[in-house]
Image: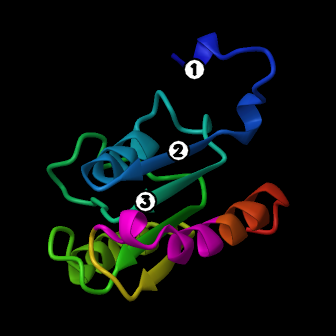
């Protein structure tokens, strides 16, 4: 899939993004040896995973990561996301947190709350200050 990018896409600037269960998948892909070094960073939106049952559990995430989540999320509870991030930090992963006042569907109910911190993180990532 990544081998077939259009020529105008700079593969060194790719960021892996996952939403909800897709964020769980993104956390797994970020550990997959086939993809390590392929992404500039990883964005987990309203979900995360760092469990011993995950594929590639024994592999380290090498790129910076940010988790944006709702303090009132009843699908991926904040404590679940925090547990995953603490596990990643024990592995020396650069993991940032952006807890927001909102639920699992904040992206749809108030996208501006998410876009501002996301864009700020992406700008720092692409400026290589993370």
Residue 99 placement, left or right of 118: left
Question: Badge 3: few (under 14), some or many (20 or more) residues near its Cα, within 10 Å?
Answer: many
Kindly indicate whether the residue at mark 3 contacts the one at mark 1 (C-beta within 8 angstroms): no
The x, y position of residue 116, in whole percent, is 64, 73
Question: Badge 1: few (under 14), some or many (20 or more) residues near its Cα, within 10 Å?
Answer: few
Residue ID at (34%, 83%): 102
Question: Which residue is labeled 3 in the image?
Answer: 44
Alpha-carbon span between mark 2 and mark 3: 9 Å
Question: Which residue is labeled 2 in the image?
Answer: 16
The x, y position of residue 66, in whole percent, is 52, 67
The x, y position of residue 67, in whole percent, is 45, 68
Residue ID at (31%, 86%): 71
**Of residues 52 and 40, the one drawn nearer to the viewer in this rendering:** 40
Q: Tell me the element at label 1.
A: helix
Establish if 115 lies above or below 113: above
Question: Badge 2: few (under 14), some or many (20 or more) residues near its Cα, within 10 Å?
Answer: some
Residue range corresponding to the magenta coloring: 105-118
Q: What is the residue that sits farthest to the right in this orientation? A: 127
Residue 23 placement, left or right of 112: left
Question: Which residue is labeled 1 in the image?
Answer: 2
């Amino acid at each position: 899939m990544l081998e077939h990018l259009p020529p105008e896409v700079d593969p060194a600037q790719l960021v892996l993004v996952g939403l909800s269960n897709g964020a769980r998948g993104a956390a797994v892909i970020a550990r997959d040896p086939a993809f390590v070094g392929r992404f500039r960073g990883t964005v987990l939106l309203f979900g995360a995973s760092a469990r011993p049952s995950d594929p590639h559990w024994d592999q380290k995430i090498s790129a910076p990561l940010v988790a944006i989540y709702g303090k009132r999320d009843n699908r991926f509870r904040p404590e679940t996301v925090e547990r995953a991030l603490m596990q990643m930090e024990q592995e020396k992963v650069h993991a940032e947190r952006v807890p927001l006042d909102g639920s699992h569907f904040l992206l749809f109910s108030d996208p501006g709350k998410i876009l501002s911190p996301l864009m700020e993180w992406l700008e720092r990532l692409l400026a290589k200050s993370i």
